[in-house]
Image (cartoon, coloured by chain):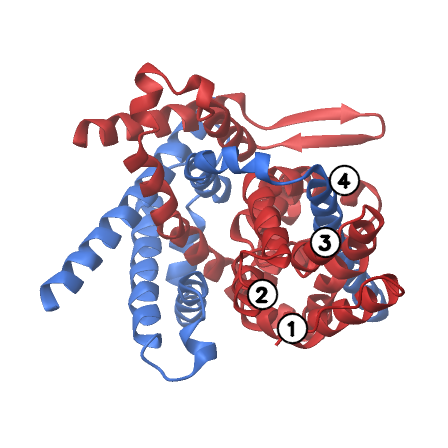
Amino acid sequence: MEKSSLNKYVKFGLVVFMSVGLILFTQEIKLLKNPESTPVSSMTIWGLLVLWLFSMVGIVISDLAKKVPIGFIQNFPVLGWVSITSLVSCMLSDTFIKAISAVDFLSITTPILTFAGISVVDRLADLRKTSWKVAIVAVFVFIGTYVGSALLSQIGLMVTGH
Amino acid sequence: MKKNFILFLIFALAVITIAEFIGFQRIPLGPIAINLLPLVFAILITMVLGMAIFRKGIFKKIYSEKNVSFAGKYLIFIMLPLMARYGADVAPKLQEILQIGWIFLIQEIGNLGTVLLGLPVAIFLGLRREAIGATLGLGREGELAYISEKYTLDSDEGRGVLSLYIIGTLFGAVFFSIFAPIMLHLGFRVEALAMASGMGSGSMMTAASSSLAASMPGMESTIIAYASASQLLTSFLGTFTMVFLAVPLQQLMYKLMVRGEKPWKKAA
């Protein structure tokens, strides 16, 4: 039991490590293409290590939360726990913010969408099962949630005079 | 097995390199410009090359069953550093965000737009119970779980939500990376659009907020902070908005719109 859960964390640790490695690679490539983008400094390396650390702490918290007998806490996604871990740590110390800010934001996104693309390829065949009607509805559903939220925020911002 | 995985990693690096070298592209369409970020090229390249007709030779090895399931199983973990980055973006702006916290709260209600706009369109197109599943929300994990619990996935409602899930997974990120900047051109405030970007789907939020940031580089930190704060709020409140607001609203609208037809099937 002990050993298998340790193995699980080693595996998660390696996957997250691969992820931050890909971010570093992307940031280097971005620099090759545009020398004026965010430079890779020793702060960047610290930033990536901090991102790795917060991710791992979030994973552990998420596992512990599954033992709390409150549905709402049990079901809170690991993605949320990681953000909260990072938010609280960054409130406590500016050093974390400085390190993380040395990691280029868009360089984080390209590797994620690369994996997202690979992960969905077997679903492409499922598209045949969906009707064109649902596809049209989907467009309006997407527009509906986005415009709905944007309108309410816009009104809110206008009311407060921002 | 191991060899395939190494090939897979090299392939990922190659896709990233190509996507980054294509870079940020601005395609003007009349008065509006469509922004395409490297992340859009990354998802398009990997999806197109993964289509059945290309899965031969080396691509068959790259897109092996094991590699594709690895990408699916660990996608969440690959996203974690991004979520950790959000903490650093929100922290310096937390005060500002709390000051207008009520706006963040009310814009959560805007997620009802899926029902308000989607349901009439679905009914108009002739969909009935399928529309219940397809318009309850963005069709992510939350809606999937709710519908499958209430109706099972092997029902019309279930098929509706599953279809939306598939379409969102495949095209959601690309859609929002194009749609968010269009809204900016239509005159919406970038802060409002940033808040709206936190819709509950990580990849759609990333696509929407990064293409906004690329359109207004000076506002990057505000955009990312607002989007991720709103996303975090959605992960707290999303289920409540769905169960207490979206579901009753949807039932009411459904009843009004299909009046005179087969009665609404009461579900347990």
Residue ID at (49%, 25%): B45
A105 or A34, which is in the foreground? A105
Residue at mark 2? B151
Chain B pictured colour: red
| Label 2: few (<14), some (14–19) or many (≥20) C-alpha neighbours in 10 Å | some
Q: Look at the numbered disc 4 and give the secondary structure of its residue.
A: helix
Tag 4: residue type?
Ile
Numbered mark located on residue B267 in the image? 1
Marks 3 and 4, how far apart at CA: 12 Å
Tag 1: residue type?
Ala
Mark before the other along the chain sequence, 1 or 2? 2
Q: Do tag 1 and tag 2 residues touch (Cβ < 8 Å)?
A: yes
Q: Residue furthest right?
A: B260
Mark before the other along the chain sequence, 4 or 2? 2
Q: Look at the numbered disc 2 and give the secondary structure of its residue.
A: helix
Which chain does the numbered disc 3 sit on? A
The mark lying in front, picked from 3 and 4, is 3
| Label 3: few (<14), some (14–19) or many (≥20) C-alpha neighbours in 10 Å | many
The mark lying in front, picked from 2 and 3, is 2
Which chain does the numbered disc 4 sit on? B
